[in-house]
Image: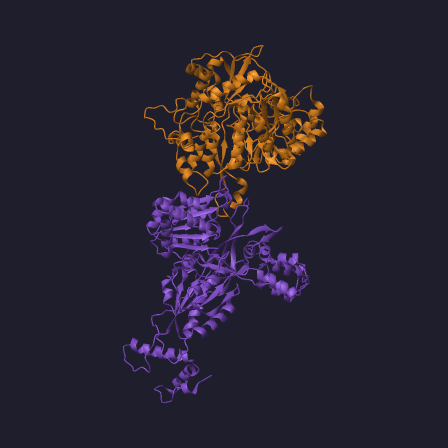
Chain colours: A orange, B purple
Amino acid sequence: MTDELSRNERIKEASDYLRGTLADGLREEITGAIIEDDAQLVKFHGMYLQDDRDLRPERMRKKMEKAFAFMIRVRIPGGVLTPRQWLALDQVARDYGSGSMRLTTRQTIQLHGVIKSNLKATLKAIDAVVLNSIAACGDINRNVMCNVLPEQSRAHAAAIELARSISDHLLPHTPAYREIWLDGERIAGGEEEVVEPIYGKTYLPRKFKVVVAVPPSNDVDVFAHDLGFVAISDKSDNIDGWDITVGGGMGMTHGEPDTYPRAAEAMGFCQTADVLKVAEAIVTVQRDWGDRKNRKHARLKYTIEDRGLDAFRAEVERRSGVGLAPAKPYTFTSTGDRYGWTEGQDTGGHLTLFVQNGRVRDVPGAAQQSALRAIAQMHEGEFRITPNQNLVIANVPTGQQAEIERIARDAGLLAPCSGLRRNSMACVALPTCGLALAESERYLPELLDALDERLAAHGLSADEIVIRMTGCPNGCARPYLAEIGLVGKGPGRYNLYLGAAFDGSRMNKLYAEDLDHAGIIAALDPLFAAYAAGRQKGERFGDYAIRAGHIAASGNGADFHANVRAYKPK
Amino acid sequence: MSSVLANIPKTAPFSEEDVALLNRVVGPASAVQRAWLAGFLAGVESATGQQAQLAAPARPAEPLTIVYASESGNSEKLAGDIAKAARNSGLKPTIIDMADLELRALTSAKRLVVIAATWGEGEPPARAMRAYNELMGEGAPRLDGVEFGVLALGDTAYAEFCAIGKKIDERLAALGGKRVVDRVDCDLDFAEPAARWIGDAMKVLTPPNAGGRVIEVDFGAKPAASPNTDIVEAEIIEHVDLNSSRSDKETIHLALSFEGGAPAYEPGDSLDLYPENDPAYVDELLKLTRLADDDKLRADFIKLRDVTTLSLKTVETYADKTGHQYVKALIADGQAREWIAGRQLIDLIANFPIALDAETLRALTRPLAPRAYSIASSRREVEDEAHLLISAVRYESHGRARKGVASNYVAEQLKRGGRVRVKLKPNKHFALPSLDKDIIMVGPGTGVAPFRAFVQERRATEATGKSWLFFGDRTFTHDFLYQLDWQDALKDGALTRMDVAFSRDTPEKIYIQHKLWNRRADLVEWLDGGAYFYVCGDAKAMAKDVRAALVRAYADVKALSPEAAEQAVVTLEREKRYLQDTY
């Protein structure tokens, strides 16, 4: 490792608070791209410069540059949208994007395929419904997640309020977004002015992810994120305060054992009134202690591994002035969604719909995008994007329930599917993601068809098993917390991970490398058979795999890479 | 043949061999040729300063004014043919491009020949538009006593066949002109009828005593430099669809290589490409007519005959030759013109089937004409190559998928490594100005082709003038033709500026004229600084929209009335700084 600051640090430093030369780059009409340094900065504005990788082979021959377009990720704390906001995003997706929308694993919506010349019009249309994409990506606090809690309306109200206040508190202050995208006036600050009181000029060393959870649901996957607040409630569901979890994170690099996914650990407990102070202190400690030389070692999880949790906690307490109580016990039951209707406590019914891999689109026989548009046009409650890429139509009065259900059912949004498919997630990957090594969203449905057939043969169709796939090891779909994790290694090749806990509290471990489609099925089929025959009552697939000795349990840190016993495909 | 009277006597101051030689030439010479020789020899003497006694005083030849209105160059070429025939007849021809015509000049013309092409749906060629409008307008001068004849060019595939020639013919008569040659309307295969008309016209227009005189010979006249315009065969070394595989369009970049060097083309020139018909179409046509076994007919129909165009004339021929009741009724009811719109020959036969023999079917076709495509390269950059940019024309009408003959021949039949026949078609009206002049190029779609040649040429010649390209198409991502070339040109300075308009990228369609409007202040500044303005591409809508946008730009930037702004653009046209190559 070098002593030099990473290149991104120099870009941030020189960017004049995230402006760079983005405004000039937008005026450059002959290329769909922006310069490399600006491509790093634009992430802080919620966008990635991508290109259609399906088209790469033909572009040079056709005397065209790569098919550049931007992905825009909207900031939606807790995944809660009004129907009007949903309609606006649906409209911009069709006007300026690829047509479809993607519900993400972190409760936001991504629009893909927005070309440079349409960025401003798109962001203005998004701004018109009081949404934006500020800090949806980049080395900064990103979208704050929150359980969707269809059956606990009161707890949801408290959790979403907290999520929004954390989101607001940790927003960057630079006016660059408004200046560049919304034609705002350039606000000249004095030399002495502190533009970013929390972040400073160079923001954080790496991305930073915060979640809010109310047990027993762990749909947000608390342990996968840098910072979590877990509600501790009394017997009558009043929230006493919050357990604090720190140091979770998914990303790693193939073949580099110094990098690993890590489950967050409990750091203590605080009152609701102290949450913002604690959150800010955690952010500033990471700002100052985090590794700015090596981006692969820059997440909070490595800071805590390197410095130790005790030292980290002490510094947070010092900076926040808040003494943290010991963490309190709670129980999570699952990371999945509850499909179909649930009654709220006082706000009407909630309908959870299954949106495969979060892809909102119309395909022959399943006009789901149109159906959701129709629902948004009549609905007056909320749309809640779940952390599992699904959608809750929340707060539906009794009188509208039958009609909304009919529309959803006709579009296949309530179609029965296996317990495996219900608990599946996939990242976007090819063709737009620049990091993807293999297919994910486009391939998982086909793999599930094959696995469903094997599960049916073993009588496991109804059993809930968590399966997640990503096209690269960075882990956007949180594959290392899935009972069956599949991580892209190369075109058509995946590493298979097993043994995670169903409630999201334990990481999995590498079971087999470089499997192709047939190899994945061949590896899993005998395990399904053994599970069906040998499981104890209520025993989950991940737990069974460890008890039966197919895989070792993963502890934290570097232990993720330890005790790997390579499975040899026959 | 030989005339005894004209024999050079042996007493002449020449050797015997020279006398024999002279007799071979002078003996059979016509009266006009002899008069010319007399003038020539007299001129040689005066040119060398030696005095000589003339047999007769040299008289100026009788003048003939030849006006042509040309779009594709055919009228212009015929004007040259007429001039040559006129000289042979003892006339002194003056050729005037209608683009440059001042109507006043016609009032003093004794003899006037007009060759007028009709373009698109009954319109004059773009460059001739101004003079044509003046001629048709109220301010046109009287032409009393001017002897005239009109040769009209057109295409029977279009409804308003030879409309411009007809109108000019009527107008010249209405202004007092004396029609001494009846108009002839020529179709695409104009060569033969035009030659006949020229012969007839010369008989009438030549003064009775043109011979027996001494003709003044202009020693300063230079023969027009004419590059090789023979049909040549080229090898296809690149055949790429420049649109992305996601595009609705297919635009072929065709790189041709010529053994022994490319024809001597200049930026702005075109190549005539000799296409073949789609064999599937021909087979369907022959099957409908039960002539599928006629191999000779099939081969001719694929390679030599236009078997798709359906004109009023074709329908009439069909009715005459077959006596088909319904077709006769269609013509009698005046419905035929409407019926042929959007239809092809195959529709006529499919809709009104009747037994046909090969000769009748052949009579319904005309020769397959070449299709001109602007050259998209400069020889200074690509040397022995020539590049073409060809968009495959495909559409549906009357329930049948239609294909443009030439463009689909290129897109579907031609392959890399194959060969194609082409012929250089110069276009001196769309040439680059001197190196220090600024140029503005407006070329949406395949209209950008000549500008690729311009930019390559300007790079190779290290031009100092600035250059500004406006390009447009459907989508930025999938239809940006030659994107990497333009990026390189902007980097190396061969191109100074570029603006783009993509109509399908946004809910409201943005076209190239909108971009011109957005940039109006700079545009007018460039034009005031002497820039040349080039427009290439679609003639139906784009060229008019672009011109209108420029008029509005002048009006806005310089606070002019609409009339004054129009006049500003007319001035550009007169100065030949507003140049069009539209199709």
Identified at 62% across, 24% down, the residue is: A400
Quadrant of the frame with the C terminus of chain A: top right
Return the x and y of residue B44 as percentages of the image width and height. Answer: 32, 77
Return the x and y of residue A424 as percentages of the image width and height. Answer: 61, 28
Nearest to the observer: residue A440 or residue B563: B563
Direction from residue A329 to residue A123 in the image, left or right: left
Direction from residue B331 to residue A170 in the image, left or right: left
Nearest to the observer: residue B347 or residue B475: B347
Nearest to the observer: residue B460 or residue A414: A414
Direction from residue A537 to residue B489 in the image, left or right: left
Number of numbered discs: 0
Identified at 34% across, 72% down, the residue is: B219
Return the x and y of residue B36 as percentages of the image width and height. Answer: 38, 77
Is residue A499 positioned above or below B11 on the image?
above
Q: For residue A507, which quarter of the picture?
A: top right
Can residue B552 be seen in the rendering of this structure?
Answer: yes
Can residue A499 be seen in the rendering of this structure?
Answer: no
Q: For residue A562, which quarter of the picture?
A: top right
